[in-house]
């Protein structure tokens, strides 16, 4: 991963980062992607809720935290209630950008919630954090730009076989508005090859050397990151730059 985050200029770098990995898919997988249900602007919350509604108590979720706005807390609590396990990756730079660019801190609240034993009772939760000045990488080794907020949720059955996935990205960024009027795709159980590609994406990020995990002795480092971001939020509120 790069040592310092770079802000994408225009839509090109972001579009390449999100869609580039599709180039190496087989014709069969690409055909299945074309059969996916596209998520229209503003419909991500319903798509994610539908994914969790489909979950059984024996199922689990692999996820990368993307921008969700004010429905994130309710969505995460449903994850904990419905599933036996949740393994979610957060990005320090994405959370920092949400605070600075959007004057919101829903992702930081979500991270704290995942560390709350009372809130997660009954669910085996692992928190992973892409640290400060590090970026998410896709399957081709390109870095996603956290300010544009790539999100992923993969529902796994009791045998850890992927059943369904929702891939979404933040389309509110001005450089992207001319690109496309969707903000994600729903991938179902008829698209096994693509589902396994997404599981691989999650696993490669989770296993990257810089990524810290609450189950690998890094919980204190994650808590320290929360405190740093919390201070940033409080500072912006104090100066009138953050929302009350």
Image (tube, rainbow, N blue to C red):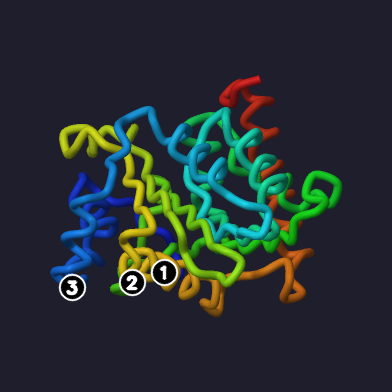
Q: Nearer the viewer, mark 2 or mark 3?
A: 3
Quarter that holds the C terminus: top right
Tell me residue 128's x, y (percent).
62, 63
Tell me residue 26's x, y (percent).
18, 73
Looking at the image, which residue is at 53% across and 45% down? 54
Looking at the image, which residue is at 61% across and 59% down? 60
Label ID, residue 70: none
Q: Is residue 229 left or right of residue 17?
A: right
Q: CA distance from mark 1 to mark 2?
A: 6 Å
Q: Considering only order in the chain, which callout, 3 or 2, is on the residue closer to the N terminus?
A: 3
Asked whether disc 1 touches disc 2, contact meaning CB atoms under 8 Å apart, the reply is yes
* Residue receiving disc 3: 26
Q: CA distance from mark 2 to mark 3?
A: 14 Å
Determine whether 88 is above or below 200 in the image. Answer: above
Quarter that holds the N terminus: bottom left
* Residue receiving disc 1: 201
Asked which secondary structure carries label 3, the reply is loop
Q: Nearer the viewer, mark 1 or mark 3?
A: 3
Q: CA distance from mark 1 to mark 3?
A: 16 Å
Q: Considering only order in the chain, which callout, 3 or 1, is on the residue closer to the N terminus?
A: 3
* Residue receiving disc 2: 139
Is the residue marked by circle 2 packed among few (<14), some (14-19), or many (20+) residues within 10 Å? some
Looking at the image, which residue is at 64% across and 70% down? 212
Q: Is residue 166 left or right of residue 72?
A: left
Looking at the image, which residue is at 66% across and 40% down? 78
Asked which secondary structure carries label 1, the reply is helix
Determine whether 225 is above or below 140 in the image. Answer: above
């Amino acid at each position: 991963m790069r040592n310092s985050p770079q802000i994408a200029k225009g839509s090109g770098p972001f579009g390449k980062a999100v869609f580039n990995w599709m180039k190496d898919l087989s014709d069969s997988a690409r055909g299945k992607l074309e059969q996916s249900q596209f998520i229209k602007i503003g419909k991500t919350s319903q798509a994610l809720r539908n994914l969790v509604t489909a979950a059984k108590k024996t199922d689990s979720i692999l996820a990368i935290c993307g921008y969700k706005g004010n429905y994130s807390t309710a969505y995460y609590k449903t994850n904990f209630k419905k599933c036996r396990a949740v393994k979610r990756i957060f990005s320090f730079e994405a959370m920092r950008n949400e605070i600075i660019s959007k004057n919101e801190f829903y992702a930081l609240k979500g991270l704290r919630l995942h560390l709350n034993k009372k809130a997660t009772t009954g669910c085996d939760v692992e928190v992973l954090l892409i640290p400060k000045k590090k970026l998410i990488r896709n399957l081709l080794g390109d870095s996603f730009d956290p300010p544009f907020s790539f999100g992923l949720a993969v529902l796994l059955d009791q045998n850890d076989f992927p059943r369904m996935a929702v891939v979404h990205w933040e389309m509110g960024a001005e450089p992207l508005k001319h690109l496309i009027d969707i903000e994600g795709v729903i991938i179902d159980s008829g698209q096994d090859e693509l589902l396994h590609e997404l599981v691989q994406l999650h696993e490669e990020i989770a296993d990257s050397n810089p990524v810290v995990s609450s189950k690998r002795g890094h919980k204190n480092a994650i808590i320290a990151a929360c405190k740093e971001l919390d201070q940033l939020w409080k500072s912006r509120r104090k100066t009138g730059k953050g929302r009350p």
